[in-house]
Amino acid sequence: MTAVESFANLGVGIDGTTSMAETLELETLELAKEADALGFHSFWLSEGYHSRSAVVRATVIATSTNSIRIGLGILSPHTKHPALLAMDAASLDEVARGRVILGVGKVLNALRKHGLERAGTTQLVKESIDVIRGFLSGQLVQYEGAKFKISSPGSRLELEPSRDLPIYVGATGPAMLRLAGQYADGVVFNYPCTPSFIRYAMPFIEEGLSLSGRTVENFEVAAYLLVAVDEDEKRALDAARRFVAQKLPTRHSEMLRHAGVTAEEISIVKESVERLGLVGAAAELDDELVGKVTIAGTPHQVVTGLRQFLGSGLKLPIVWEIIGSNRRRSLILVAKEVMPKLL
């Protein structure tokens, strides 16, 4: 593995909790426009179930930005046929030509909330990539797989697709990591991602890359990182607490293990949320636990935290949720006081 000694750029991203009114009027749209102007690499939108559509929000953002790439990550081929995912990505690409990144993978929340079978997910994601690539090629697609079938005479996109639209895989376990390396253009890790987890994951990705005759130099490794930044360390930590209290109990066990979060700590957070509610539980979180799953503090402390990922295999850190007492100010702090010290 070739070690990355600096980060060429940073991405930013948000989950689906921002309302469409906020997206249209201020919060998300203004952040995306600001990120575009400040030179961030990409703006990522996740899709929760059942919150707001990443594709709809991305379309709003695409019409109001010029150069920033737009990441859809991660969308579920369990809940939407890969031909429709290709249609969505190609339609968005008509608005933001050459700026779209399509992320697909096993979205556990989608499986749980829709009562879908988890068995065979790796094969399903592999076939999804095949089908999506077929449709994005502009050619007539016929497909015969274990999970998806497109019978003769086949089907095609009825619009001009972008043939080089990259597909990333959201991956955590060994099988999906190998699949990402073998078939995708990149991987995007969920939060709370740590240098330890990425070092664990890279050999599996490299196995997949070797099977496709490729190397990591031509493969993107991105990760959602929970970053809270403020001129005051305490304000940064306080801003991260509610997000940690809300999200920590739902995180993947392998990610939590590498972050050093124990089962006892997770149980305490769950009990605290049930007893005190989200705001009360957040107030009770200690700094040590918050520090395990976030990079929180002053710009200098955030730089130090991000530098720990250098050499792990990570290429594109994505500042997830742009946490701070004021999102716009936090975004500007990252752009002006963090990003230049990582290049």
Image (cartoon, helix red, strand yellow):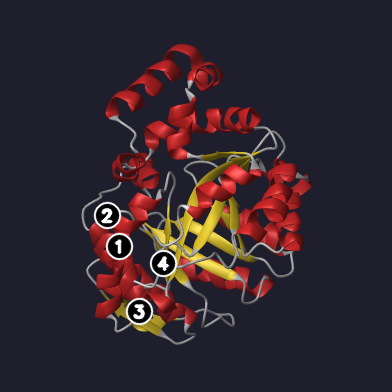
Three-letter amino acid code of the residue under disc 3: Thr
Q: Are marks 1 and 2 in contact (CB under 8 Å)?
A: yes
Vertical arrangement, residue 264 with respect to residue 1, above or below: above
Q: Position of residue 29 (x, y in %)?
A: 73, 52
Horizontal arrangement in the rendering, residue 322 relative to residue 272 (left or right): right
Marks 4 & 1, CB-CB < 8 Å contact = no
First in sequence: mark 3 or mark 4? 4
Residue 177: numbered disc: 1
* Residue located at (29% from left, 56% from top): 200
Question: Which residue bears the numbered disc 2?
Answer: 173
Q: Secondary structure at mark 2?
A: loop
Residue matched to label 4: 82
Residue farthest to the top, as pictured: 275
Give me the disc on residue 215: 3
165 up-or-down from 174: above or below: below
Foreground tag (4 vs 1): 1
Horizontal and vertical percent for residue 94? Answer: 65, 74
Quadrant where the image shows the C terminus:
bottom right
